[in-house]
Image: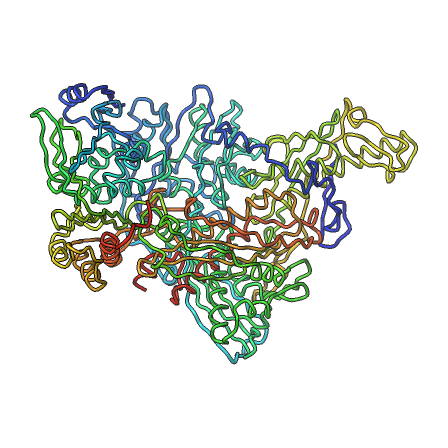
Amino acid sequence: MTSEAVNTAAGGSTATGTGTDTIVDAGTRGVGADVGRPDGVPKVQGRFAFSSDLWADDFLWGHTLRSPHASALIRGIDIGPAVAMAGVYAVLLADDVPGCLTYGLEHGDQPALADGQVRYVGEPVALVAADHPDIARRAAEAIVVDYEVSEPVTDAEAAPTAAPIHPDGNVFREIAIRHGDLDVAGEVVVEGVYEVGMQDQAFMGPESGMALPDEDGSVELFVSTQWLHVDREQIAACLGIDEEKVRLTLAGVGGAFGAREDLSLQVHLCLLALHTGKPVKMVYSRDESFLGHVHRHPAKMWYRHHADRNGHLVKVEARIVLDGGAYASTSSAVIANASCFAAGPYKVPAAHITGLAARTNNPPCGAMRGFGAVQTCFGHESQMDKLAAALNMDPVELRLLNAIGPGDRLVTGQLITGTFPTAEVIRQCAYAPEPEIPLSDDRRDLPGGSGRTTDAADTVRGTGFAVGFKNLMFSEGYDDYSSAACRVSDGVATITCACAEVGQGFVTLAQQIARTELGVDEVILAPAQTATIGSAGSSSASRQTWMSGGAVQAACREVRAQILADVAAEWGVSPDGLVLRDGLVVSLDGQQEALLAQVTAGTGYEADVEYHHAPTEALDENGQGNAHVSFACAAHRATVDVDPDLGLVRVRDITTAQDVGRILNPTQAVGQIEGGIAQGLGLALMEEIVLDDGIVRNASFTDYVIPTTLDMPDVTIAAFVEEPEPGAPYGAKGIGEPPTISSSAAIAAAVRAATGQALPRIPIRPADIALG
Amino acid sequence: MSDVVVARSLDEARGALADHPDATVLAGGTDLMVEINRGLRRPSHVVGVAQVPELRLWSVADDRVTVGGGVTYTEMMTTPLADAAPALAQAARTVGSPPIRNAGTLGGNLGTASPAGDTLPVLAALNAQIVVVGPDGERRMALDDFVVGVKRTSLRPGELIVRAEMDRPTGRQEFLKIGPRNAMVISMAGLALVADHDARAVRCALGAVAAGIPRARDAEAWVAERIDWDNGAGVDDAVAAEFGQRVAAASAPIDDHRSTAAYRRHAIAVLATRALKRAFAQGGSSDA
């Protein structure tokens, strides 16, 4: 086995190639082809095993007792009534955590089990293992916790000056971006205050998994997650054992969208399994799931845009406050993103942006699709429309006038060196033909839908436009590398990578890449696990196509080089004259060929690589620095019908164009775009965790509503803007997040256009329109 | 674990309930199973009635529609029952998704007695009598007397909802409901309105805006005098608007996580205005 570290500085000459690669095999089953996903048919037939389907002989069910209070001291816990119940095998408290009590993705401030204090409703307090899920639940209910309840801190703006609710204080991070001449003022100035509610990722598959103990004190965990290796690191620390003694395997993931970046039940399962010596399974109920994972940060944003009278942006001032909830999670990275991208994909000569992520007694917030860029996109796009109105200018023209691109600088001072076709994305979307959508005769196609509230005469139509962007991969100096191994034996390729398939389609892509690089058809994708392969990084930040795709590509190319070198030596030719194609080793002069299956019979060839993106740097005290690897943008145009008297909205069409680098699988690209827009529509119009003194009032799919097929309009993809990204494998950019970033803002703009109302908050509730 | 009896006839159901008067009745399970699965209820005895043929009956007469407690929402949406009680069909169409409507029943909607129960305003507006049987034989009562509070009924131990008998008036029927999305919603505010040309009456009942299912009787009486019953002319806009305000006065909404009292009151006024105008519009109605 060979091992190789590959570093692909943008534009550098390395083993992983650049975006100028020719995409081969389109039309077959390689990169660029419309290959169906291997897990697609089992999923629609109900045969796919999700993490909630795990089973083992003689296993126990785990259950978590959670805090009913947003803020309380724990004066005592009596586990006696639970322990006394028949069928109960273990009841564990904070004292039973053998290693480090706390964990966290960026700051380890969150206790695996509450230690004398609870800081949010739903915080885990005790664990039970029993031989039946109902007994486990009842035993948890039988535990008597003596709480001394106190007034919770629930206002993020007030939190920094409130009494600390955690030893680390109430500020996760404050950030200031100072760029250009801050004394400059525009001839036209517009101000606005905007708010975004707390969205949930609302994945379908609740948190679930199974831990199996081993006699040597190690533990095996099957779990749905976004990043196996970072889970392992945190679990091992809490268990107080070596990472090698914690083996994770990815179980079937029923959606993630950021909510599986943080630990939920991982430590709990392992604790119970090691304590009882039996396999332990947990499946959260839907209510529990809403309490058991982080949400999108609610935001409040103050904006002041300055422009000259021709519409050129002169300065952007903004203050952003995010409610991070009780524990750090990824708040410090989310507020950095929100701040870095607060001015939008525009050339902004001067900017003063301050961001605060505060700790409160609300549910913890962390990663969700768009990761900070969603909130500020609603802010900057609302401002651009307001500015266009003040200038008496077409809002699309205003955006085109200021669109950022290669050679321009972000407000962080970073020079754009890769592709960033903002203007083209705007043009393709905004100037696409307007869909012809007649007002329906059927009330079910109008606002209110099946409720029959609205006739065509009760509606007004509006169209809105928005553009947004964000970074691809992790930022601020983080080396979120990926690892992959390739083995070719008997003509069959086997790819091993710990990349978490969370629905995004990496399993399809990894096979496509191997086919393209090795000229084979049959590609086996080994299970994602931690035992034999290194970290793949997180399935988030629109990064896996680039990072794990890059690792798979590099591993395949390394194996290809080994094979060609051996064959070339045997044939007495240069390896440069040989290629792998259709299961053959072929000389380009057509004189010689050999079956790959024969060449690789018996011993086989293998390579194991680490793939790194170009290094980035921390932001300095003025928020300046080359903090990001690459960027992707998208634009959305929404057409809505609104019933202003009742405040009901029907989205009729979303037209979009997206900066994708290169499309590696057209159907999967469409899937990401449609799904991302649905999530954006949800945030614009209906999805919000409703809190009352820190208590979640709608922890169910009855009351946390997400779009149905009657809410989701047709999506018109006006264009995939394909400008290959230098340094990216095949030139492809991640495409998962941009569809969610500006679709919410476009819908809000459309509702404003229809009603003439300001609507400074999303989701827009019926009362906001009808009584606004 | 619950002790479950699956009744195959009305007599079996009555017998099982006589044995365990505190038993929980399970019909389509679209409310009960959610509560059980969430751990909110743990009934010791359950009597399943989905297999009781007598409860699945419905009938249409010239002036009367009778719907068994086991009739599903999907059946309510299907002709000829849907033609005989159009507002019931409209309300049924707003419940959940197709699988839920295939399972959920009229009796279940009554038994749950949520203020947001979608068929309940229709039953109230159609002067429905709720027929129940129990140890003491059969009782019948108006919806007002059946629903006595939020998720509270006047059912006595051992009693079972058998059917609802409702008017079949000659005029149009309208059910309108507001939710936070275009389908599969719990009502934020709902309203049923029927025009009875023979009786020269308008009947209007409200959902999700009070502890019970209020009839807007003052508004009904007020508007009945302002309808041109003889010539069939449409309703004047000002009358419709005033009617809306008067209907809204019959609501007693609250603020909760689904909406605000102010919006609900406002929405009821808008819905009532629109329902009245539709019910007396000249020409046809515009949808199913």
Residue A595: name its quadrant: top right
| Residue at figure coordinates x 16%, y 58% from the top left | B246
- Is residue A667 visible from the viewing direction of this image? yes
What residue is drawn where x is 55% and y is 46%?
A672
Task: For the N terminus of chain A, give its image quadrant.
Answer: top right
Q: Position of residue A109 (x, y in %)?
A: 45, 48
Judge by depth and name the residue closer to the eye, A234 or A764. A764
Residue A33 or residue A572, whichever sits in front: A33
Where is residue A684, by image quadrant?
bottom left
* Extreme-front residue of the structure: B231
Q: Nearer the viewer, residue A337 or B32?
A: B32
Q: Residue furthest right?
A: A572
Q: Is residue A367 visible?
A: no
**How many labels were placed on the picture?**
0
- Image x and y of residue A726, in percent: 71, 54
Position in image of residue A63 (x %, y %): 37, 32
Pinpoint residue B208: horizontal percent, then vertical percent: 23, 48
- Quarter of the picture holding the C terminus of chain A: bottom left
